[in-house]
Image (cartoon, coloured by chain):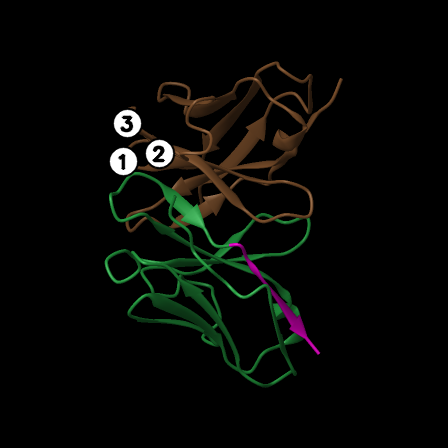
Chain colours: A brown, B green
């Protein structure tokens, strides 16, 4: 049973870069896409982007200018970097595995990132 | 940009059937996926490929598709089904994915 765990700072200052890592255990990182999703307090889920283990990426149009997702297959990790953050980027950030038909079938527990000075 | 439209809320009595719709122009060509989201918990996949149910998901959860609308149906709703439900799909040019705005299911 694959498990995913997000890690990274829970507090980021405005205008700085948010960085999170998702560690995959109990399964292979190869042959899958891996995604980041967030949920601001009191709001809905927002797809941020995903990365193939080969490195191909897709991003949300609304975040594309600020986001970068990368993968390290040797460490079984993939990462999210979101630059120039504002209070609007405060959210619970989830990482997830994207399976054969596009479904996100395994999720991390989520990590709250607060943007505040 | 591409949008998926869901009703903000649906209410149903225990034991009855709840139907949650999701509309989007690309849905005739793209699969839809449904997630259950409870406060403080990670989303759970309940339907994929429009109508397939993952292992471990109760049979009362089903999905269907018709034109630009997909529907999540929960038959014999139980109190534990009270949650937010989100549809997800991809835009027609295979460029990005989106979630619907979410539907809060209330079990009366």
In the picture shown, does residue B91 fall above or below B71? Answer: above
Query: Badge 2 local density, few (<14 within 10 Å), some, or many (20+)?
Result: few
* Residue B81 counted in the magenta span: no
- The image position of residue A74, as x and y in percent, is 36, 18
- Label 3–label 2 contact, CB within 8 A: no
- Residue named by callout 1: A31
- Residue named by callout 3: A56
Q: Which residues are magenta?
A: B101-108
Query: Regarding mark 3 in the picture, which secondary structure is present there?
Result: loop
* Residue B104 counted in the magenta span: yes
Between circles 3 and 2, the one closer to the viewer is 3
* Nearest to N terminus: mark 3 or mark 2: 2
- The image position of residue A50, as x and y in percent, is 38, 34
**Chain letter for the residue marked with disc 1 in the picture:** A
Foreground residue among A49 and A76: A49
* Nearest to N terminus: mark 3 or mark 1: 1
Q: CA distance from mark 3 to mark 1?
A: 12 Å
- The image position of residue A90, as x and y in percent, is 66, 32
């Amino acid at each position: 049973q694959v498990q995913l765990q997000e890690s990274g700072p829970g507090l980021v200052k405005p205008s700085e870069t948010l960085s999170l890592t998702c560690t995959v255990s109990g399964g292979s990182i190869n042959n899958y896409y891996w995604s980041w999703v967030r949920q601001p307090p009191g709001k809905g889920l927002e797809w941020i982007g995903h990365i193939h283990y080969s490195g191909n990426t897709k991003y949300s149009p609304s975040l594309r200018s600020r986001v970068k997702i990368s993968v390290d297959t040797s460490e079984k990790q993939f990462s999210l970097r979101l630059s120039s953050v504002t209070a609007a980027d405060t959210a619970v950030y989830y990482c997830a595995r994207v399976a054969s038909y596009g479904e996100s079938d395994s999720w991390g527990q989520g990590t709250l990132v607060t943007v505040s000075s | 940009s591409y949008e998926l439209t869901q009703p903000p809320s649906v209410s149903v009595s225990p034991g009855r059937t709840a139907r949650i719709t999701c509309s989007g122009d690309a849905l005739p060509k793209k699969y839809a996926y449904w997630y259950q989201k409870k406060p403080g918990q990670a989303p759970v996949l309940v339907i994929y490929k429009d109508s397939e149910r993952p292992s471990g998901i109760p049979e009362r959860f089903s999905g269907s598709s018709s034109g630009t609308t997909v529907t999540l149906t929960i038959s014999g709703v139980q109190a534990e089904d009270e949650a937010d439900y989100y549809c997800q799909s991809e835009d027609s040019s295979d460029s990005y994915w989106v979630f619907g705005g979410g539907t809060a299911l209330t079990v009366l």
